[in-house]
């Protein structure tokens, strides 16, 4: 497949979490255009399964949504970190658990129109409890849910976070059998 031709590229903003870049490009279709992209190193999303089959979710306040959301464990990957390493770190930080087995089961781009972030969803099994080490600005509640409870949360639209909806739906449909 033909690649886009980048005519110019300028970093407009570079912050702690993301950056903004403006590119002048000729896309594979031949269209010449300006694209403003949010740069991001990628994220990991962890679906932790307890020995009894229940799935751990976390609840935290999300300022952008202006509400508390139930979510899967997730976070930005550090520079040079693999998805497995990032998932292990985030799982430990947010829940205290460590996993004997972490396996990528889904990869996707949450908003490919302007965001370069790629998300890796990982299944975590063989969990051992420990002490959570949340970041200073994270106030997290952890709770385990049965498959039936997760299904009910989806049906009643109590899960509002896209990565969590995608991960839980995929898990219940294809992996939990």
Image: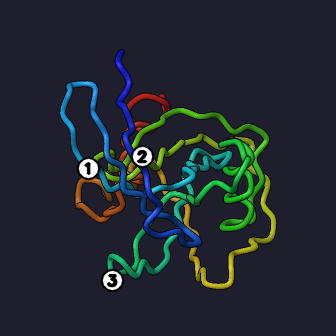
Q: Residues within 10 Å of mark 3 (few under 14, many from 20)?
A: few
- In the rendered structure, the answer to whether residue 10 lies left or right of residue 132 reads left
Q: Can you give x and y, in whole percent of width and height, for residue 15 in the image?
A: 54, 72
In this view of the protein, can residue 175 be seen by the observer? yes
Rendered image: mark on residue 66: 3
Please state the horizontal and vertical placement of residue 66, each as a whole percent of the image. Answer: 33, 83
Residue topped by disc 2: 168
Please, which residue is most extreme toward the top here? 1
In space, the residues marked 3 and 1 are separated at their CA atoms by 32 Å
Label 3 vs 1, first from the N-terminus: 1
Callout 3 secondary element: loop
Q: Nearer the viewer, residue 76 or 55?
A: 76
Question: What mark, if any, has residue 34 been given in the picture?
Answer: 1
Cα distance, mark 2 to mark 3?
23 Å
> Label 1: few (<14), some or many (≥20) within 10 Å?
some
Quadrant of the drawing holding the N terminus: top left
| Mark 2 element type | helix
Q: Residues within 10 Å of mark 2 (few under 14, many from 20)?
A: many
Residues at circles 1 and 2 in contact by the CB criterion of under 8 Å: no
Q: From this view, report whether residue 84 is shown above or below residue 77.
A: above
Q: State the SS at label 1.
A: strand
């Amino acid at each position: 497949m033909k690649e886009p031709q980048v005519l110019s590229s300028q970093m407009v903003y570079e912050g702690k979490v993301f950056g903004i870049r403006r590119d002048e490009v000729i896309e594979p279709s031949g269209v010449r255009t300006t694209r403003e992209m949010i740069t991001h190193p990628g994220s990991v999303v962890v679906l932790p399964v307890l020995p009894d089959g229940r799935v751990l979710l976390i609840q935290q306040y999300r300022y952008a949504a202006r509400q508390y959301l139930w979510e899967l464990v997730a976070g930005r990957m550090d520079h040079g970190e693999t998805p497995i390493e990032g998932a292990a770190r985030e799982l430990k930080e947010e829940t205290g658990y460590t996993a004997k087995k972490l396996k990528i089961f889904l990869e996707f781009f949450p908003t490919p129109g302007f965001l370069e972030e790629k998300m890796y969803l990982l299944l975590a099994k063989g969990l051992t409890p420990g002490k959570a080490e949340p970041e200073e600005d994270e106030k997290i509640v952890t709770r385990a849910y049965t498959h039936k409870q997760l299904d009910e949360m989806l049906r009643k639209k109590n899960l509002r976070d896209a990565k969590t909806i995608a991960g839980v739906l995929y898990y219940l449909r294809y992996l939990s059998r």
